[in-house]
Amino acid sequence: MRHRSVADLMTHTAVTVRRTTTFKEIARLLKEFDITAMPVVDETGHPVGVVSEADLLRRRPAGGAATAEELMTSPAVTARPEWSVVRAARVMQRHRVKRLPVVDVDNRLTCAAVERGRAGRSPVGPLGPSQRPRKRKSLEAATIRPRRNIMSNRITVGLDGSSAGSAAADWAANEAELRGAALELVHAEDWAQYGPFAAPLPEPRPQWAEDLLSRTRDRLLREHSTLDISTHSTNGLAASKVLAASAEDADLLVLGSRGLGAVAGFIVGSTASATLPETDTPVVLVRSVDGRDQPTGHADDAGPVVLGVDLRSNCDRLLAFACEEADRRACPLVVVHGWSLPPVFSYAPALDLGVEKEMAGGLETTLHELLSPWERKYPRLSVDARIVIGQPAIQILDAAPGAALVVVGRRIRRPALGARIGPITHAVMHHATSPVAVVAHD
């Protein structure tokens, strides 16, 4: 069977803006053409990002002085007209985007876009005025409301009754308040296994779970009275699958991990370990030391955000997440790349010291080129780029003490034997004292 192509479904008459287009002009165009997003193009017609209503609501500046370059989500994720709809849908799902600007062989915008949800429908109107009237929140009205009243995103936190879970809830509440997001408290419990059969525990666990969620919600509301907090509990299903499903449309999933001491590190429980490969939503592991309910780090800590990168991989999702977190906290971003000389040099009787310097210089150039567009997007962000020779996990951990957040990546894999967490991320998860965010990427 031949799948429909992007060319069959894409809309026509695209409305675009330039990097210098102002917030107010973007809002005017979105309202005038009854659209929710527009590609941002450079002087040659190449898309450099997408600016949407969500971007305007999330990053609303005082007085509407920001430009498209400061507001847009970038780099732009694009499609080609000859792609199948299935391929386009997979790209949208992988990058968590709702629309793809369509480009030609020269990567120039073709004055068209394809949006999520068009598969299976007939081609419909232009990216200009919609053929079907719809009710949408007034952008002008939304922009003058307090940020905390605009719940355009959500954070999910898993609770299990432990001090680590309580610490995770505290951290998530601080983060939700910082983002202006809603907070969802989730409790999921597997039934106990007896031989080949599953049966519920004899005690009234559902009531215990409801009491746990209610107590936690009341406690958080005493400290964060403006938060929108919901609760959800279930049992009989794998907890990891329930948490992953709850976080499917969330911006963040927060779980707890218990400390064992300075030498042993932290326990990343079986539920957290099983949940990580099940979801593409960023997962934050919050530390609880010595059985205390308080997390080792708070969402509004003044320390830097530390990001570990592998220059051989696609780092866009990690950089987008880390830059947004650092910008939100108004704290520095420390980017660490650990590397080693190729094995062939390990056996050289007299290594030319210039080789190490030359290779390090090349890596520094690559890292600065990688960071350059993000520094332009976040001009107020202080970025400390470090190329350090040594094992990557050790270099990230050396930079982690006192960090507000440590960000590492996990490759998106769906192998037959199950997904896995790489050794660098595994080491950081178990030994960093700060909260650790694990971001899935290509």
Image (cartoon, rainbow, N blue to C red):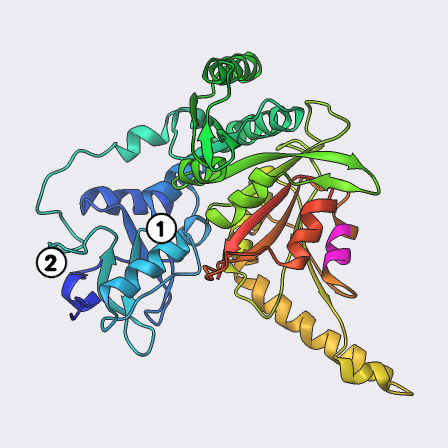
Q: CA distance from mark 2 to mark 1?
A: 23 Å
Name the foreground residue: 73 vs 29: 73
Q: Which of the two residues, 253 or 206, is positioned nearer the viewer here? A: 206
**Mark 2 Cα within 10 Å, few/some/many (few <14, many 20+)?**
some
Q: Decide if residue 306 is in sight here.
A: yes
**Does 244 sit left or right of 272 as displayed?**
left
Q: Look at the image and say whether residue 131 sits in the magenta stretch.
A: no
- Residue segment shown in magenta: 393-397
Residue at 51%, 21% in the rendered image: 201
Q: Can residue 60 be seen in the rendering of this structure? A: no
Horizontal side of 315 relative to 20 (left or right) equals right
Q: Mark 1: which amino acid?
A: Val
Q: Left or right of 247: which side holds 267?
A: right
Q: Residue at x 60, y 40 (%)?
A: 270
Which quadrant holds residue 167?
top right
Residue that carries the numbered disc 2 in the rendered image: 123
The residue sitting at 43% across, 22% down in the picture is 231
Between residues 279 and 442, which one lies in front from this camera angle?
279
